[in-house]
Image (cartoon, rainbow, N blue to C red):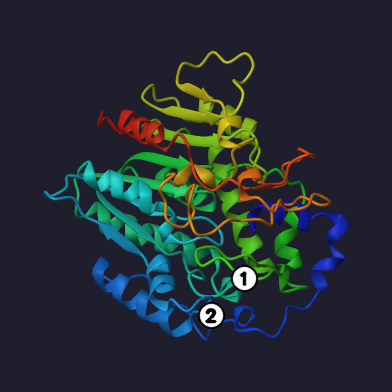
Amino acid sequence: MLPRLGLLLSTLLFLASCAMPPDYPHFQPSDNLPAYDQERFDHYVRDTRAWIAENRAFLSDDRNLEIQLNTPFERRPDKPAERGILFVHGLGASPWYFSDVATAMANDGWLVRSILLPGHGTRPADLMLPDNDDWEKAVAHHANLLGAEVDELWLGGFSTGGNLVTSHALNDENVAGLLLFSPGFYPDNGYLFLAPAISYLWDWVDVDEEDNIVTYQSLPTRGAALYYRSVRTVQKSLKTARFDKPVLISMSQHDSVLDPNATLDAFQIRFPNQQSRFVWYGDTPQELDDPRITALTSNLPEQRISTFSHMNVLFAPENSYYGEKGSHIIFDNGQDGIPLPEDSEALWFGAWGQGAAERYHARLTWNPYFRDLLDSIREVTGDS
């Protein structure tokens, strides 16, 4: 869904956004949003799970699995934890996005929590309900809640969630460090500023078949406007502020949503801690002289991978849904005029809109370097 945002907000497709969605529950908002300010995290999980069960527009016969993968969760280590991290997902995504990283970090002794941003977990139309304060307050509340239980608080975020946790960390001295996966600081789209205005004229930017139980495929204009507000907030802060504590940033050179080079520049200027690391998936950036930056090739022909996508960094190859042999493949990947191969062994993988004309590319949804990413996390957090 997000990879289409730049395209669908462009002038050429502006009028196409007027199309009415089909009369399905996915495109009709719920009556309300769940509370997120419970005094105990287990009560928050309980209440949110019940709300998802009542309001979700289910996509499969396995309703319990859909509820589970969209519900906030906690991973506790075997021993009492001194360190904790709060993860925040991206636009249209779910808490489950952090399940692989969370399991590994809990095994390393961390108390790990992953929350649900208001408007997610049920149906795309529910992104019409929250405002920017709901997202910022949810992050602040759960950062404070976790911070009261551990001696050292870290925050982590994917895409839009990266914007939210970074903005919070720049104003919260209790945050000891950040883990940012494809943070959405700098969108590769000059039309995003139109999203708030469009939200008053039309309800939908993108309407698609909903077939993914952990990610919305359709996007209300209100959701695009909320992402823009997160961008505006974090960019304003990063113009003047510096985050002097450790940070890990990982990003694909071929990210179809964001401007990776702008993020790389910001890392070198605004995140000066020498323990920080930037993991760059792609060709080694020219004139690179910062030893904190590691480049890993994203062209892996022996694995039928041409490029890395916006989303794949978070998922282990063994992941049962998005992994190398997972149950869900994102075939709709922005390629026109190239037939889908009948032989699955001829299918290649890459970023959205991969343009190799002789090959059909599905979306890459797992990270071949996942274990290396965990090592980078341990290095930045001081666990190595």
Quarter of the rendering containing residue 226? bottom right
Q: Are marks 1 and 2 in contact (CB under 8 Å)?
A: yes
Q: Secondary structure at mark 2?
A: loop
Q: How many C-alpha atoms fall within 10 Å of the one at disc 1: few (<14), some, or many (≥20)?
A: some
Name the side, left or right, on which 291 lies relative to 255: left
Quick one: 151 or 381, which is closer to the camera? 381
> Which quarter of the rendered picture does the C terminus lie within?
top left
At 56% from the left and 50% from the top, the residue drawn is 233
The secondary structure type at the circle numbered 1 is loop
Describe residue 263's horizontal placement relative to residue 371 as left or right: right
* Residue 107 falls left or right of residue 206: left
Q: Is residue 145 above or below residue 365?
A: below
Asked whether 94 or 64 is in front, the reply is 64
Count of numbered tags = 2
Looking at the image, which residue is at 54% across and 76% down?
59
Q: Is residue 198 left or right of residue 112?
A: right
Q: Which mark is residue 57?
A: 2
Against 353, residue 332 (above or below) is below
The amino acid pointed to by label 2 is: Ala
Q: Earlier in the sequence, mark 1 or mark 2?
A: 2
Q: Visible in this render: residue 199?
A: no
Residue 254 coordinates in the image, percent (x, y): 65, 36
Q: Which residue is mark 1?
A: 210
Percent of width and height locating residue 167 = 47, 47
Where does the N terminus fall, quadrant-wise? bottom right
Give the Cα separation between the discs numbered 1 and 2.
Answer: 10 Å
Query: Residue 363, how many percent across, how many down?
Result: 62, 49
